[in-house]
């Protein structure tokens, strides 16, 4: 028979073995409403991580910029204020020209081209983010872009002098070359900017138009395609390394799935969302051929300007993509 002491030790050991591994709990910030496809995709990513990690990593999402403003998220992740968040790559063009390459009109104007550009950019971004203590988990493309206006667009000259809201340094330059007075504004400030007269038009995706109910301030949506800019979900490198190896693998596998799903969701949304804009009283039309031609010329001009500020390593990425 076992002594009482041995029984006690055996019981204690059994309890230790049975105790679950303590779960890591992360909070995450994203910039868009719950009905935005980016947010819906992030929620599926979070669910997959929670399930497949056996609850070892729990991520609580704060959407629509309620925790941290979208354009402040990168700094918050870098400083480990939060371990994970969603960012818009195109707003950081002042830090490195690579951030705005995908935002040049018609450089990568289809989903296949945008996927190829993403793959070519990935090693560059991996190195850039690692240098700053972060890691990109996956990329999510916006649908093609268009112009929200109070008038029907017949030609490029219709834009002259109009006050346009755009979202990146690249689109600001494009807007100015098209004749607009262009202003960069965060997503959340769009309704107020309309009400105060700061803007009278938008260049953005059907998704954003729905998110901010563009029909309250504009009547026409002119779809150009042109740009498939990207968001990214990023993580603090130290926080990621603290996860057990098996949980790290779960996160990366879920991220790969989320990236593929993001591309499919983005493709699916365009036609459906044009219908939603129409249902809400907007006139939806494709951009006239002359405007598309002008935008392609602007894209080529902007690419040459981009090369002037890009590092040799960045220019090598573009050259690889163009091959």
Image (cartoon, grey):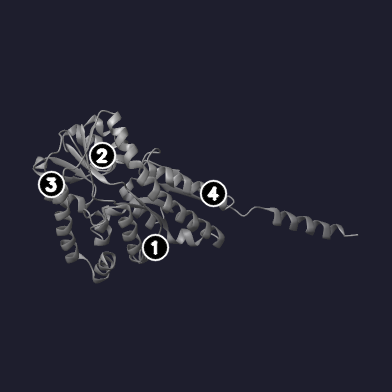
The N terminus, quarter of image:
bottom right
**Picture coordinates of residue 241, whole percent (x, y):** 49, 62
The residue under label 4 is 50
Give the alpha-carbon distance from disc 4 to disc 2, as whole Å: 34 Å
Q: Is residue 30 visible?
A: no
Give the alpha-carbon distance from disc 3 to disc 1, as whole Å: 45 Å
Mark identifier at residue 290: 3
The answer to whether 47 is drawn above or below residue 279 in the figure is below
- Which mark sits nearer the N-terminus, 3 or 1? 1
Closer to the eye: label 4 or 2: 4
The residue nearer to you, when weighing 43 against 281, is 281
**Picture coordinates of residue 284, whole percent (x, y):** 23, 35
Q: Is residue 37 visible?
A: yes
Give the alpha-carbon distance from disc 4 to disc 3, as whole Å: 50 Å
Give the alpha-carbon distance from disc 2 to disc 1, as whole Å: 30 Å
Q: Residues within 10 Å of mark 2 (few under 14, many from 20)?
A: few
Q: Residues within 10 Å of mark 1 (few under 14, many from 20)?
A: some
At a point 47% along the width and 49% down the height, the residue shown is 45
Q: What SS does tag 3 mark?
A: helix
The C terminus, quarter of image:
bottom left
Give the alpha-carbon distance from disc 4 to disc 1, as whole Å: 24 Å
The residue under label 2 is 189
């Amino acid at each position: 028979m076992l002594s009482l002491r041995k029984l006690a030790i055996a019981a204690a050991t059994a309890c230790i073995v049975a105790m679950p591994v303590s779960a890591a709990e992360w909070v995450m910030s994203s910039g868009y409403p719950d009905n935005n496809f980016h947010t819906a995709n992030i929620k599926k990513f979070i669910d997959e991580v929670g399930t497949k990690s056996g609850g070892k990593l729990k991520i609580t999402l704060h959407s629509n910029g309620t925790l941290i403003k979208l354009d402040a998220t990168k700094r918050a992740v870098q400083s480990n204020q939060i371990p994970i968040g969603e960012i818009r790559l195109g707003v950081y063009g002042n830090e490195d020209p690579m951030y705005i390459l995908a935002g040049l009109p018609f450089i990568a104007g289809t989903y296949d081209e945008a996927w190829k550009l993403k793959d070519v950019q990935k090693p560059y971004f991996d190195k850039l983010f690692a240098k700053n203590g972060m890691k990109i988990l996956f990329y999510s493309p916006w649908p093609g872009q268009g112009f929200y206006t109070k008038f029907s667009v017949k030609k490029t000259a219709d834009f002259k002098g109009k006050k346009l809201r755009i979202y990146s340094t690249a689109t600001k330059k494009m807007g100015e070359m098209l004749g607009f007075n262009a202003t960069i504004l965060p997503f959340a400030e769009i309704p107020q900017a309309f009400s105060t007269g700061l803007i009278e038009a938008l260049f953005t995706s059907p998704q954003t138009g729905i998110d901010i109910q563009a029909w309250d301030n504009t009547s026409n949506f002119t779809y150009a395609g042109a740009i498939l800019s990207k968001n990214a979900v990023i993580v603090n490198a130290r926080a990621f390394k603290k996860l057990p190896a098996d949980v790290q693998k779960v996160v990366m596998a879920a991220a790969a799935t989320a990236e593929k799903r993001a591309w499919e969701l983005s493709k699916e949304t365009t036609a459906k969302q044009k219908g939603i804009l129409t249902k809400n009283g907007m006139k939806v039309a494709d951009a006239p051929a002359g405007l598309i031609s002008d935008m392609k010329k602007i894209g080529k001009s902007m690419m040459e300007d981009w090369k002037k500020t890009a590092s040799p390593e960045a220019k090598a990425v573009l050259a690889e993509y163009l091959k």
